[in-house]
Amino acid sequence: MASARRGPGRPKIMREIRDLVVRMAKENRMWGYTRIQGALGNLGHVVGRGTIANILKEHGIEPAPERCRKTTWREFLAAHWGMIAAADFFTVEVWTPVGLVRYLVFFVIELSTRRVRLAGIHPAPNSDWMNSSGSKSDR
């Protein structure tokens, strides 16, 4: 006699196994369905390739060939960290012989070393100053 609680079709894969499939795919981007299936088998879980494909599709995870072609932000940042910098402005008000003057300060910070470099200071910046703010004449 069939159980009254269960509907037609196969029972769903346990949540723990579904989470494990997603985790394996995210942590091992080169692993395809068959490799994930083998790893699950090594842990004593029998899961079909189609089921693995469906689980990954439900979670928006592409098949291994497409996953391998894309770089994650973590990988991108790790590869380029030494070359990434951020730039910003702040203002400083200074008393001068002509009164209070507001200066715009342009600076750059190297993220890997946290070294801050002054790129330029000007009381009335314009496009010409911005285009040349890295030159020695404004330092």
Image: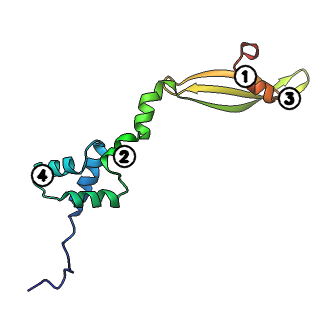
Marks 4/1: CA–CA distance: 61 Å
Residue 34's tag is none
Dot 4 corresponds to which residue?
41
The local secondary structure at tag 1 comes to loop
The local secondary structure at tag 4 comes to helix
Q: Please identify, in this view, whether the residue under mark 2 or under mark 1 is nearer the observer.
A: 2
Closer to the camera in the image, 45 or 96: 45
Asked if disc 3 and disc 1 are in contact, CB closer than 8 Å, the reply is no
Q: Quadrant of residue 47?
A: bottom left
Neighbour class for label 1 at 10 Å: few (<14), some, many (≥20)? Answer: many
- At 35% across and 45% down in the image, what residue appears? 67
Q: Quadrant of residue 136?
A: top right
Give the mark nearer the N terminus: 2 vs 4. 4
Give the mark nearer the N terminus: 3 vs 1. 3
**Relative to 72, residue 53 above or below:** below
As drawn, is 40 to the left or to the right of 90? left
Q: Position of residue 132 (x, y in %)?
A: 74, 21
Give the mark nearer the N terminus: 4 vs 3. 4
Marks 2/3: CA–CA distance: 59 Å
- The three-letter code of the residue at mark 1 reads Ser
Dot 1 corresponds to which residue?
133
Give the mark nearer the N terminus: 2 vs 1. 2
- The three-letter code of the residue at mark 2 reads Glu
Residue 66's tag is 2
Dot 3 corresponds to which residue?
100
